[in-house]
Image (tube, rainbow, N blue to C red):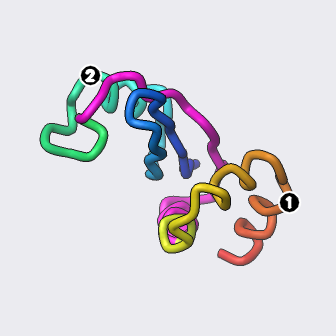
Amino acid sequence: MHFVYIIYSQKVDQFYIGETEDIENRLLKHNTGFFKNSFTAKTNDWKLFFSISCYNRTQAQKIEKHIKKMKSRKYIQNLKKHPNISKKLLLKY
């Protein structure tokens, strides 16, 4: 199983979207500076905002790409507010 995850930093007031097999481990890596010179290395207060359980890595990558292409904070917030959006993404990809 793979996950699309969205994390949020209050310090920089931004979201980050990614995919992984292990959300807890990935969040720890983001918060400890494991990914040097990456966007998430700017701060260490990342919190899990939302996640979608996917069937496999390919599906997770396609959904991640879709969310990133939207380039919309409102869309990300709506993913959390309206679970049917996630269901549609899982059916589409």
For the residue labelled by badge 2, is the local secondary structure a helix, a strand or a loop? loop
- Depicted 23 relative to depicted 31: above or below: below
Q: Residue drawn 76% across and 72% down?
A: 91
**Mark 1 secondary-structure assignment:** helix
Whole-percent x and y of residue 10? 48, 29
Q: Is residue 88 above or below residue 73?
A: below
The image quarter containing residue 11 is top left
Q: Residues within 10 Å of mark 1 (few under 14, many from 20)?
A: few
Q: Nearer the viewer, residue 88 or 54?
A: 88
Residue furthest toward the bottom?
92
Residue bounds of the magenta highlight: 42-65
Q: Is residue 35 left or right of residue 47?
A: left
Q: Amino acid at mark 1?
A: Asn
Question: Where in the figure is residue 25, as x and y percent of width and height?
Answer: 40, 27
Q: Which residue is mark 1?
A: 84
Q: Which residue is mark 2?
A: 32
Identify which amino acid the numbered label 2 is placed on.
Thr
Task: Name the foreground residue: 63 vs 76.
Answer: 76
